[in-house]
Image (cartoon, coloured by chain):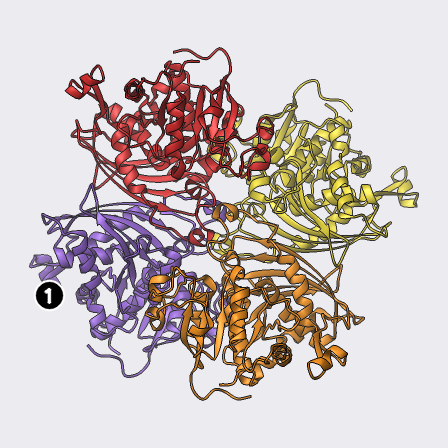
Chain colours: A orange, B yellow, C red, D purple
Amino acid sequence: MQQPTSPVPVGILGATGTVGQRFITLLSTHPWFTIHALGASPRSVGKAYKDAVKWKQTTPIPHIVEGIVVKTCEAKEFQDCKIVFSGLDSDVAGEIEEEFRAANLAVFSNSKNYRKDPNVPLIVPLVNPSHFSMIPQQQALFSPPLTSGFIVTNANCSTTGYVIPLHALEKAFGPLEAALVTTMQAISGAGYPGVASLDIMDNVVPYISGEEEKIEWETLKILGGVAESDSTEAHAIGGVLKSFDMHSQHPLRVSASCNRVPVIDGHTECVSVRFHRRPPPSPQQVREALAAFTPTAQTSGAPSCPRHAIVVHEEPDRPQPRLDRYFQDGAGVSVGRIRQCQVLDIKFVVLANNVSIGAATSSIINAELAVLKGVVRV
Amino acid sequence: MQQPTSPVPVGILGATGTVGQRFITLLSTHPWFTIHALGASPRSVGKAYKDAVKWKQTTPIPHIVEGIVVKTCEAKEFQDCKIVFSGLDSDVAGEIEEEFRAANLAVFSNSKNYRKDPNVPLIVPLVNPSHFSMIPQQQALFSPPLTSGFIVTNANCSTTGYVIPLHALEKAFGPLEAALVTTMQAISGAGYPGVASLDIMDNVVPYISGEEEKIEWETLKILGGVAESDSTEAHAIGGVLKSFDMHSQHPLRVSASCNRVPVIDGHTECVSVRFHRRPPPSPQQVREALAAFTPTAQTSGAPSCPRHAIVVHEEPDRPQPRLDRYFQDGAGVSVGRIRQCQVLDIKFVVLANNVSIGAATSSIINAELAVLKGVVRV
Amino acid sequence: MQQPTSPVPVGILGATGTVGQRFITLLSTHPWFTIHALGASPRSVGKAYKDAVKWKQTTPIPHIVEGIVVKTCEAKEFQDCKIVFSGLDSDVAGEIEEEFRAANLAVFSNSKNYRKDPNVPLIVPLVNPSHFSMIPQQQALFSPPLTSGFIVTNANCSTTGYVIPLHALEKAFGPLEAALVTTMQAISGAGYPGVASLDIMDNVVPYISGEEEKIEWETLKILGGVAESDSTEAHAIGGVLKSFDMHSQHPLRVSASCNRVPVIDGHTECVSVRFHRRPPPSPQQVREALAAFTPTAQTSGAPSCPRHAIVVHEEPDRPQPRLDRYFQDGAGVSVGRIRQCQVLDIKFVVLANNVSIGAATSSIINAELAVLKGVVRV
Amino acid sequence: MQQPTSPVPVGILGATGTVGQRFITLLSTHPWFTIHALGASPRSVGKAYKDAVKWKQTTPIPHIVEGIVVKTCEAKEFQDCKIVFSGLDSDVAGEIEEEFRAANLAVFSNSKNYRKDPNVPLIVPLVNPSHFSMIPQQQALFSPPLTSGFIVTNANCSTTGYVIPLHALEKAFGPLEAALVTTMQAISGAGYPGVASLDIMDNVVPYISGEEEKIEWETLKILGGVAESDSTEAHAIGGVLKSFDMHSQHPLRVSASCNRVPVIDGHTECVSVRFHRRPPPSPQQVREALAAFTPTAQTSGAPSCPRHAIVVHEEPDRPQPRLDRYFQDGAGVSVGRIRQCQVLDIKFVVLANNVSIGAATSSIINAELAVLKGVVRV
């Protein structure tokens, strides 16, 4: 584990979009990374960033990026970057991120395109940084093998929030058998312009396209391990073959119901879980385990990692998005209302700031961890 | 079953409150009932209704009640009423409703005070009007036995919405084993002034005091049957002793998580259920059973009963409170998104208008059923 | 003035849009008009209406239109219609309405395209139906002159609301000298998808593109009269030349500040006015004059005309959009808080339902008036 | 002008209320002031602050105050404080603040009780700190004269926002003749619980009790000067008599229309002004004058004074409360849409964060200025 000794130049793809604006806000004061290049769609290319963007953050555009001239999203324009963050829309992210990886650039993507790729780690930094172990295999698949290029994705915003306490529970009490989650998701999760005001004011929309499938699938990849097999196929690439085991050692059933609610930022999720272990832990044991949870990302010294991965609330009516989403700059999650579930074992409420830990913040901590682990050499 | 041949005079307790205003709006055009007396707290007594009330409905005060002089909530003032509807706050409802019952008045209450009373039916009119069979026993407990006085309550607004499809499912597929419900409840459910705007705008409050317990308990009373025992105690009152069996024949576990969301009217609820029967019905079978459900209240000719007890939506993103809460004047419920649950058997979304079927409308249909069944003689 | 003796077939252009949906809702129960043809953009053509539309009203699609096959917006498809209502977007309304007029169809348009045309009346039905007198001149400009084709537009939603009390004041107290209006406009005024939820939740947007100019200009055309001149040009078309005088007899200065607020339906406007007459009327005189105002549209028997053109509220905190927008189905306006203005003479608040009197309802009353005046022969 | 050389102990009255919570948040990191004592109502007295308060800020309770034991609001409990900030409700502020002043404590009050007192300065720190000159006369009225006790109030939140640009305009272009302001005020301006959610969601309330009168009166006191008269009465207290001239040298007519809108924080105000000077300045001159405005508070070194008293926006649709209220921690105001007014001379939009510059921040800057001017000796 070692920290960089000089500033690490980074690039941002999709820099004018909402996720891009968050990357810029967070990276403009980052202790290690300096914004070196910004990429966006053709209509922004060649303009100063401040003229290309319709800035929608509640803090002003950082002075440091105002004058940066926006580039096309081509790898040749980002050759001096050690790390590239992608906030691209999924309709273009696939090809562009592929081109960047092939050009030996380290891509940390917030897009969904490669999350299901069997060689791309889907990393929630407070949960499964161990999945970085897949990078060598991902690079070895290229010919010649990539030396520094790879793609790492972070999870869907609604998945990220609740897998953090789920992981903490598995660490403390062994594998889960079932998880049932009902989400109440903020409008900012849909990007800009995103949700029409006529659709959401004084309303709940009990459906978000593709979201439930994402949660149900991503949870298994993230909470599962990395299996190794000594197959013929494995030998062909010079060693054992690694694969994500999708929690198959201890099958986990996940059921998600997703709702959009009139909240600007912050996904609130009601979660019920059942453990394999009988008898299950008590609410009090769960409370203590969640409060005590310390992710490896924290001990490894990643600067954007929150001090408290999980804040456990004792008040009966917390967490609430409006009051709790800004705590620790939204880098941790808040859990409350831990109590017995009459149907499964334990139920609780989790709140995660979808634009922070649910998006850009996770990509950035992932990049910090990659530096600390030497996956990105700086 | 017989309809009244002349107008039935009714009274309203708590007439200036939000529930009272709803009773007035609905009863002002009722085909059978005519508003005869209005009762409210001392500071309103003696005033014309229009001067006593801070009217908050989106339709104007019905002309017919504007000049009615508000009375105290004492039974002697309501002697000419065949039926009394109570929209009283629970801190006063207990004593007042008791006094009215003792004075041989038929009380249909929206308050929670007597819901747990072992002799008071808790009736969701589209589900368990069979529980009216408890009335004779309730009356027999008085000395001398009451001839026309009794109390019937309707359920909590969040319970009402989801027990309707649950009942339809049990009717079609036999008993349920488990139900897990996560609610997203409208602010009007908390009365007026109720929820402070600073607490709910751009926010979700994942807690409503006492609400989860109400749902978990009321569901069992409503969906359960009426048992008869031939005990000594029963003989003491001259017959078999009836009691609500709390669904004990086929134990049902219920787990509720209640949230307040920034919606004005309409409770949206995400429900997962598990059946005793194996294999369970398919989503398509559930869809058909819910659409086909016809409550006895409907066939018996209660005029406020909705034409469709359950409207099944095929669109992927419905029901939504803002679009669907006014359908059938809010007297039915809307169900959508019927699909497999990975943890239990089937999951779906239900929407109920908490100020209509969830409150005053249920009391009124209960009163209509009581007339049709001869429980109230008109 | 005569009412039609048989149903009048009407068509609706832009039938799948928000204004089109309102036209359909209102016309489906209209006492004179029957929906005969629906026109929409190519992607809807050939589909049954219920399959073409994404219905967003709080009442279900009227059964009567569900199966109507949507047509292209070409005049030949609407030849059997006596009246055509246009809810087209302004980017296509210009050409299409022109083609319909040329084909001798009577077009009542909610679009802005022809509002500034010197031969097209801009009619707020409760204010200036006298401007129908311009129709013959509009028809005479064609060669051969049109026999039944013409275009009449209604005003911008924010203009409509406040010119009604302004007109009532001029009728009672003579010409105004200045009007200063600050609007708080509902999101539905921007159509669908319209305003992004991220732009308006917990926010005010103090700008609506082009809106202030529209109010400032339209007010003068609507409140002004029709002048006649005996010029050479006039003789060329065989008579006197009529023109809208833009209130030039008594110059009126209008200043508008337009804001978008998080309200679904209903524009609230704070208005201050100064009269030419000195001393100006007192608040009490203004109150009485507004309450007494009876538009000619009402006495002429237009069925959609509200019973009270202006409802004057005495409560200190009314009108409010959520409580007052539905009164009289939104066909009238509500005025309250009439009081002295320290800078001009009198100030007050006016509320108009932008999707009713501010849009489709005005077009429909205009068409009713055209029938009653014989401008449309039925 | 001199800065304190050691920490200045301060007290907060009404410490558990919303304004009190803001005082605590701001003062917990103040460079000069340290929180020494907290006062609240009897039911909080004796409890640790964290147990007494229902904390509603989006940042956690500062650790520094969590354990402070809440005291009664009596001067004897605050004798060690050099400055006392009052966030008391107006129903108790009158007596308590009076008692504190009489005990020679310097009171900076956010309450309205003494704003109209002819000897109490009503100071918007970016506008009229010159009114501190009234303090000696205020002290001289006591017998014996007070040596260090006095009361200074800040203005109503809606007044504060718009008098800052008005003052800047008068400084640049001479006296104003008329100002017409329409406000769209945030719910937090009404305190907690304040506005019921049922009253404001999807709504505008065009009335705030007493608010318009406050704006119309306070504006004159703040923008006016301090007159001196050499009367008999003056001699009685040993010198000239000072009085607030209420802008009487150049009469200014002010008309306010106040609305509550569904915005959490930030008052947006549409302002039209007329100058005495003819011709009036152009929009461009106004733009430049506002951008160049530097209040004396800024040059004098008050640490909480914003760097830009007025931020002038060039974008057509700004300022907006959600995006601009946090800039400079809400200590300045934002102005945009400067343009000609057809009725008066110039119109523009101003946004002020009502919980910052509109409340606690102003009290704190006033206290800083009092220290710098030696009015409070530290």
Residue D17 drawn at (x, y percent): 43, 62
Residue D342 drawn at (x, y percent): 20, 41
Q: In the visual, does B192 lie left or right of B76?
A: left
Identify which residue, D215 or D162, lies in the foreground. D162
Residue A94 drawn at (x, y percent): 55, 65
- Rendered-image quadrant of the N terminus of chain B: top right
Q: In the visual, does D64 lie left or right of C125?
A: right
Identify which residue, A211 or A344, lies in the foreground. A211
Q: Which residue is mark 1?
A: D238
Can residue B3 be seen here? The reply is yes
User: Going by the picture, which residue comes out furthest to the front?
Assistant: A143
Identify which residue, A369 or A107, lies in the foreground. A107
Q: In the visual, does D10 lie left or right of B204?
A: left
- Rendered-image quadrant of the C terminus of chain B: top right
Q: Element under label 1? A: loop
Residue B202 lies, with reference to residue A68, above or below; the image says above
- Quadrant in the picture for residue C161: top left
Residue shown at the point (46%, 31%) measured from the top left: C73
Residue A22 drawn at (x, y percent): 45, 67
| Mark 1 residue type | Gly
Can residue C285 be seen here? The reply is no
Identify which residue, B359 or A289, lies in the foreground. A289
What is the total number of numbered labels drawn onto the structure image? 1
Q: Chain of mark 1?
A: D
Residue shown at the point (38%, 70%) measured from the top left: D26
- Quadrant in the picture for residue C273: top left
